[in-house]
Amino acid sequence: MSTKTDYSEEIKRLLGNFYTPVATQEETTDSTVRKTLPEIHQEVVRILPARWIYEDDVYHALQEMGFKYFPGKDPEEDITELFYYLNLK
């Protein structure tokens, strides 16, 4: 039986290499990207092992690093979703 490997530090290091938090929606800049949790999770598992990294691992890493999510409209589906606003480094 396998046990889950803890990749929390690697997730934070990976995200921290590419993004910095945005405190409010009004503080966005031209280098700000808007992503959902599943989109960020997909970015992480392209590099780190998908078998051991779940969306809740990415969520906890984002929270610990000070990233916030905000409601926003998905223009393609006309529904409100929660988006993380991330500044590119």
Image (cartoon, helix red, strand yellow):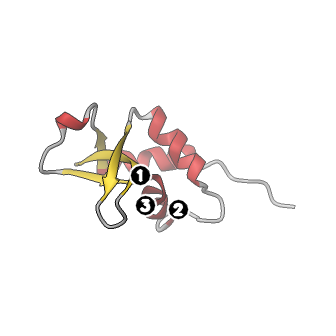
Measure how far apart labels 3 and 2 are at the Cα level: 14 Å
Specify which label sits upstream in the sequence, 3 or 2: 3
Measure how far apart labels 1 and 3 are at the Cα level: 15 Å
Q: Find out whether the residues at labels 2 and 1 contact each other: C-beta distance under 8 Å.
A: yes
- Answer above or below: position of 42 versus 69: below
Residue at mark 2: 48
Farthest residue, direction right: 1
* Residue type, label 1: Leu
Q: Find out whether the residues at labels 1 and 3 contact each other: C-beta distance under 8 Å.
A: no
Specify which label sits upstream in the sequence, 2 or 1: 1
Q: Residues within 10 Å of mark 1 (few under 14, many from 20)?
A: some
Tell me if 27 is positioned left or right of 60 in this view.
left
Specify which label sits upstream in the sequence, 1 or 3: 1
- Answer above or below: position of 35 versus 49: above
Residue at mark 1: 14
Q: In percent of the image, x 68 and y 52: which residue is there?
A: 5
The spot of residue 60 in percent (x, y) is 54, 39
Tell me if 26 is positioned left or right of 8 in this view.
left
Select label 1 or label 3 by which is in front: 3
Q: Secondary structure at mark 3?
A: helix
Q: In percent of the image, x 25 and y 53: which residue is there?
A: 33
Measure how far apart labels 2 and 1 are at the Cα level: 9 Å
* Residue type, label 2: Leu
Residue at mark 3: 39
Q: Residues within 10 Å of mark 3 (few under 14, many from 20)?
A: few
* Residue type, label 3: Glu
